[in-house]
Amino acid sequence: MRITVHLPESLEKDIKTVSQNEKTSVSSLVTKAVNFYLKEKHKKEKINMFLDLINKNIVSDDAEEEIEKERIDCDSRF
């Protein structure tokens, strides 16, 4: 599939530089980046859904702290 996107010039330069350094095509690099973003977004949605369920039930403080750390880690990626 072909999709046209408009990128800021500085981002275009960075993408081309990284693709050259990694010896891969711009298309392949962008595909990997979009896949990574979508997987992380999906993971974040699952964590949030799980946390919503936890808020409806009683869980140990340790488990809740670990889950909240994961949520913060996911939030910091975006």
Image (cartoon, grey):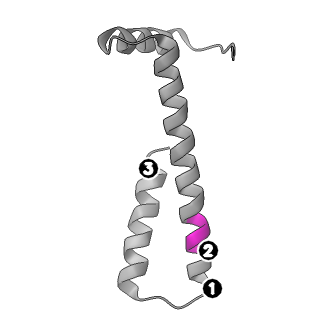
Up-down relation of residue 61 to residue 35 (above or below) = below
Task: Write down the residue under mark 2.
Answer: 52
Describe residue 12's horizontal placement relative to residue 57 as left or right.
left
Q: Is residue 4 above or below residue 64?
A: above
* Label 1 vs label 3, nearer the camera: 1
| SS state under label 1 | loop
Taking the spot 41% from the left edge, 14% from the top edge, the residue there is 14
For this orientation, the residue located farthest to the left is 21
> Which SS class for mark 2?
helix
User: Looking at the image, do the residues carrying marks 1 and 2 touch, with CB atoms under 8 Å apart?
Assistant: yes
**Residue 31: x percent and y percent?**
53, 24
Name the quarter where the N terminus is drawn. top right
User: What is the number of the mark on residue 76?
Assistant: 3
Marks 2/3 in contact by CB < 8 Å: the verdict is no
Tell me which numbered mark, 2 or 3, is placed earlier along the sequence. Answer: 2
Can you give x and y, in whole percent of width and height, for residue 47 in the image? 53, 64
Q: Is residue 14 left or right of residue 53?
A: left
Look at discs 2 and 3 and give the one toward the viewer. Answer: 2
Give the x, y percent position of residue 72: 43, 59
Q: Is residue 54 above or below residue 41?
A: below
The image quarter containing residue 68 is: bottom left
- Classify mark 3: residues with Cα within 10 Å, few (<14), some (14-19) or many (20+): few
| 3D distance between C-alphas at marks 1 and 2 | 7 Å
Q: Which mark is residue 56?
A: 1
- Circle 1 crowding by C-alpha within 10 Å: few under 14, some 14–19, many from 20: few
Magenta stretch encompasses residue 50: yes
Looking at the image, residue 73 sits to the left or right of residue 54; the answer is left
The residue segment tinted magenta is 48-52
Label for residue 21?
A: none
Q: Main secondary structure of the magenta part?
A: helix
Q: Residue at x 44, y 8 (%)?
A: 13
Spatial distance from mark 1 to mark 3, Cα to Cα?
25 Å
